[in-house]
Image (tube, grey):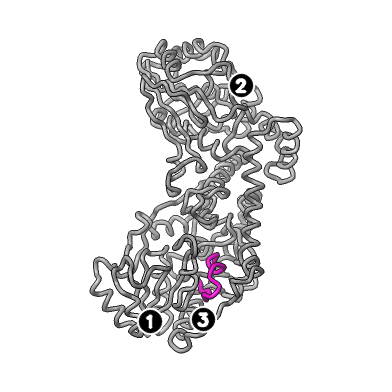
Amino acid sequence: MRVVHISVSPLSGSPSRIVRALNDHTEIEAKHIVLEPNHFGARTYPGGIPWKEDREHAVAEIEAADLVHIHNHFNLKENKFKFDFEALHKRGKPMLRHLHSSPEFFQTGDTRIVTDCPLPQLVVAQYQERHYLRARPVPNILPVENALYSPIEKEESPLRIFFAPTMPFSAWKVPPSVSRWATKGQLEVTRLLKRLEARMARCAVVIESVIIQNRPLLECMAVKQSCHLSIDDMVTGSFHISSLEALSHGIPVFNYIDSRTLATLRELTGADHIPWVNCRVEEAEIFFEKLIADADLRHELGKASRTWMLKYYHDRELVQHYVQAYRDVLEQPDVFKKNRLDPNEARVRWTVDGEYAAHYEGRVGRFERSAHRLCCAESAEYFESLLNLVRSACIVGFDKKPFLSWLFENRFKRIDPNVDFFHPDRARYLMAKYSFALPYIQGKHVLELGCGVGYGAAYLKKQGAASVTAVDKDMLAIAYAEENYARDGVAFVESDAQTIELPRASQDVVIAYDLLECVDCDGTLLDRCRQLLKPGGVLLISCGDLWSSHFEKHHLRAYTSQSFRHLLNAFFSDVSLYRHMFHLYESSSRHEADSIENMNAFLEENALCLESLKRGESLLAICKL
């Protein structure tokens, strides 16, 4: 039998892997034709006949095939291939369609044109199967005994944790036009990894977070092989091919598998258990701590993962699902016309997907909207009710970590973007200012005045500063910083920024973010900054943090663009002023595919600009002597 696979994109290498397994383990001769091999940019996958470059060869393979295996949904007559598959099918060419994404990915509004396609249908046996109740679930295939998918020896330190997010979305907030399945919780997982790195460093355990995006498959696989733990999708209840790759490598994989996905896996593989470390992102930290602390447990789970893949997920066995599907298409195609379940029954829709969507919405309400309300609470009664909510939800361990209770009580004055009860948009807004400073601090000695709880100082050191001296007059803020952000090359000092005792002309860079409006005398602060800078030094200073009226209660004065510039010009000969503008998904008209980083913008401020600051805006200046 000759089978040709057709796909617009490489689909994470899935068609090529199936074709390889068919050629290696069956008597079927299989080929893969791909329209856009570089569809994902730098994220490339080997294999396949390129349609545009070798159309004549591709058409000849299609004509000679006994069956055409079409991946994903596209119009058979009018399509990007500019080839009439519909006419070919009417001439008697057997075809089937293999679905890798949810119906909404292909069609907005009424998706029945996708789900009720008359061709025999296969569907990936992950989250996708619950959307196509007429399609036959089939596995993603891996060549588990190939060297690239096998375990390798590795050093025990640093302990490397692999994560490959596809889209830059929060676990709890995705753009309206995409489904919840589009997120792996990049924001929350990244913050989790940062916390683990900081906490384990105090125990002399070196954690290295390996976050891979937009890299070729071969490079990505080589990096993953060298890691000790892997994260796939701790948000949605499904898993991705990244999970299977890491399990094949003999690496413990953190992933949330809901009961629907679990039942599908068991039916497909015959396994009576799953090898994943099955946890959700909001409870994952304790799971990581236990595996990081116990090397023997890590090794045992990794070995069990590899054993499971060889026993239950070997490509030699699983490819038979495709062989059987091809036989059925050719010999008894009517079997594909029967629904596995009736999608018209409300009970079925609820059991298959509605119940799980409701669970997810409940998690969103608990861990995202509640967190947002925490930042807006005013009354003592409301504050206490929300504090109890946080405690009961186990978002933070107040009893074990008294500093978090202090931070919560002072949340309108002291902020740590790496703590979950602060809104993630607020975290991105604050960190953007420190990212703005990076070109100026490389290899430099940096003084941060008004450092708060120290997250910015630690970030600047990690990103290339030679040293950071971080100053705040709040004793508890400095104690929190020393507890959570102690690093080599970072010194936390309790002192008033206006009177700190440091040698004149001793600093390459001085940073004073959101401090000017809080000190008794702004001129005294600027004069002290000027004294501390070396010749050629740079002051980075911001004001006007108009995020919320709750934060503004701590401001002693407000600045306009003109008054801020006028004040700085009295002390510095070279002043460049920028307006920091932050865009939320809810208010932005930008396409949802824009990256999270692009939600922050620093626009140079015209000297004649009279426009007042709006919510989510502030002023930031670069000042030179």
Front-most of 165 and 614?
614
Q: Compare marks 3 and 1 and give the one earlier in the sequence.
A: 1
Which quarter of the figure has residue 450? top right
The percent coordinates of residue 160 (x first, y second) are: 51, 50
Give the answer, above or below, for where 421 lies relative to 4. above
Q: Secondary structure at mark 3?
A: helix
- From this viewpoint, is residue 63 visible? yes
Q: Secondary structure at mark 1?
A: strand
Please give the name of the residue rendered at 40% of the width and 16% of the height, measured from the top-left corner: 534
Q: Write down the region rendered in magenta.
A: 126-139
The amino acid type found where label 2 is placed reads His
Give the spatial CA distance, label 1 vs label 2: 71 Å
Mark 1–mark 2 contact, CB under 8 Å? no
Give the spatial CA distance, label 2 vs label 3: 67 Å
Nearest to the eye among marks 3 and 1: give it: 3
Circle 1 is placed at which residue position?
Answer: 67
Q: Is residue 132 magenta?
A: yes
Nearest to the eye among marks 2 and 3: give it: 3
Give the spatial CA distance, label 3 vs label 1: 18 Å
Q: Is residue 9 magenta?
A: no
The numbered mark at residue 554 is 2
Q: Secondary structure at mark 2?
A: loop
